[in-house]
Amino acid sequence: MTFVFILLLVALLLFLLEIFVIPGTSIAAFLALISWGSAITLAFMESPEWGAALTAASLLLGGLGIRYFPASRIFKRFSLKASLPSGKDTPAEVPSYTGAARAISDLKPYGRIELPNGEQHDARSLSGFIPTGSEVEVVKAEKQYFIVRKVAPDNPQLN
């Protein structure tokens, strides 16, 4: 029975190591689970009553830990509190616009377009590939990009 308690102590130490020293690697947690499972198995082999009691105690303590540890001061000390600010990498919403534009990159089907006022925006082609320099028509403004289609060369609307 002494070996069972040694395995449980090793499991506890490995679990604490995983939480406080090397979080995120899961190696120590995996070894802790193996040690804990071995302790339960050995306890059942020595005495079914001890095995059942150890299993019940483990489940009870594990459940209490899962329930109350995230609300503890220790957990709050180690958890991330700051949020990342939105910055330049966050795409801005596109203005409401429909009409003529020019492809400034290949749209396959995503790329960049330039509006008549010089603003550049992301766009998605309805008609597949559109080469750079082609005249396009903005059909719809989505939240972060325009939906465009290639203009036929004989279309007088955009000339």
Image (cartoon, rainbow, N blue to C red):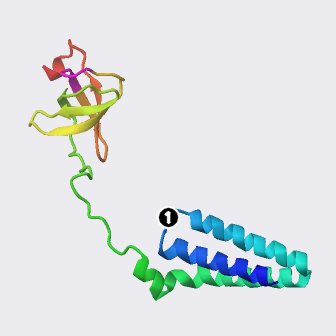
Q: Is residue 20 above or below residue 122?
A: below
**In this rendering, position of residue 84 left or right of residue 120:** right
Q: Is residue 105 magenta?
A: no
* Element at label 1: loop
Q: Quadrant of residue 18?
A: bottom right
Q: Position of residue 73 (x, y in %)?
A: 45, 87
Mark 1 — residue?
24
Image quadrant assignment for residue 51: bottom right
Work out which quarter of the rendered image holds the N terminus and state it: bottom right
Q: State the residue at coordinates (68%, 69%).
A: 33
Residue 135: within the magenta? yes
Q: Position of residue 13 (x, y in %)?
A: 60, 78
> Residue shown at 21%/13% (left/top)?
153
On screen, residue 84 versus residue 17, left or right, reads left
> Viewer-proximal residue, 155 or 122?
122
Nearer-the-camera pick, 60 or 133: 60
Image quarter hosting the C terminus:
top left
Name the residue located 33 percent from the left edge and 22 percent from the top edge: 129
Name the residue located 38 percent from the left edge and 73 percent from the top edge: 80
Instruction: Residue 108 in the image: state x and y as whole percent.
Output: 33, 26
Q: Check disc 1 and give the amino acid type.
A: Gly
Q: Is residue 60 above or below residue 45?
A: below
In this view, which residue lies farthest toward the left? 117
Q: Is residue 134 above or below residue 154?
A: below
Q: Residues within 10 Å of mark 1 (few under 14, many from 20)?
A: few
> Which secondary structure class fits the magenta region best?
loop
Q: Which residues are magenta?
A: 131-136
What is the count of numbered marks? 1
Say left or right for 141 vs 67. left
Across and down, in percent, residue 58 comes to 72, 81
Q: Tell which of 45 and 142 is nearer to you.
A: 45
